[in-house]
Amino acid sequence: MTTTTEQAAGGTAERRVRVVLVDDHRMFRTGVQAEIGRTEETGVEVVGEAADVDQAVTVIHATRPEVVLLDVHLPGGGGVEVLRRCAPLAAAAENPVRFLALSVSDAAEDVIGVIRGGARGYVTKTITGADLIDSIFRVQEGDAVFSPRLAGFVLDAFASTDAPPVDEDLDRLTQREREVLRLIARGYAYKEIAKQLFISVKTVESHVSAVLRKLQLSNRHELTRWATARRLV
């Protein structure tokens, strides 16, 4: 995330919003907290954090924040499971809890999945601090917020009356394996993937091996062709 300036964040401090931050990478949560959590400057008060689905559900019910920043890929079932278990809070007539997905993934199925699950918006982790703060307040007010290129996924999905076809091969992969698959297919080196996903190079190698085994492919070139044929890149 890009560092925001005081001037960019200025003007939000008169407003207040209580936020819970849900992401399985502690380093990323710390960075976001430092970026948006200067309440006197930003107007954002981070009232809780969680690293997996069970923690998230517990913290959200305990704190009743106005906005939850929710990663899509979490241990225990992912962001969609958090949305399912917190659905009564999101549907409350008074003081509903609203969800804004914040993820490294820009894959159509991830975006559509959490929006169908009840999230009010979806932004990627390349967002600037100032824009993230603005998005949080907009979601608090009931707006739908998306990173520019992601809005088209949602419009296309909800305009279509046909259910998307099930890809049995893709369904064999975990959410993290799908992330690694897309980055490999886009030409990222293992070190770049590790940095992007906040994991070790060895973990990236393990995910790639698992993907190749599950898809019965031999190397990353075949993997790239496989992903391109399914428009996953």
Image (spheres, rainbow, N blue to C red):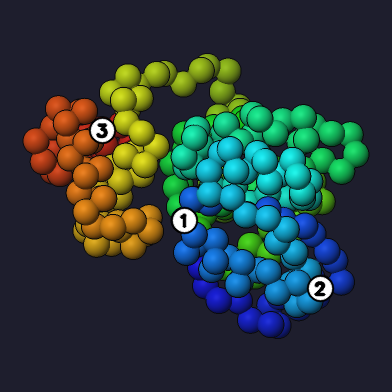
Tag 1 secondary structure = loop
Number of other residues with Cα within 10 Å of mark 3, as a class: few under 14, some 14 to 19, many 20 or more = few
Q: Residue at x 53, y 49 (%)?
A: 51
Number of other residues with Cα within 10 Å of mark 1, as a class: few under 14, some 14 to 19, many 20 or more = some
Please, what is the three-letter code of the amino acid marked with disc 2?
Ala
Upstream in sequence: badge 2 or badge 3: 2
Residue 192, position as x, y percentages in the image: 28, 62
Q: Which mark is residue 143?
A: none
Cα–Cα gap, marks 1 and 2: 27 Å
Q: Which is nearer the eye, 175 or 75?
A: 75
Which residue is under mark 2? 13
Q: Residue at x 63, y 81 (%)?
A: 5
Q: Is residue 153 left or right of residue 209?
A: right
Residue 33, position as x, y percentages in the image: 61, 67
Please, what is the three-letter code of the amino acid marked with disc 1?
His
Cα–Cα gap, marks 2 and 3: 48 Å
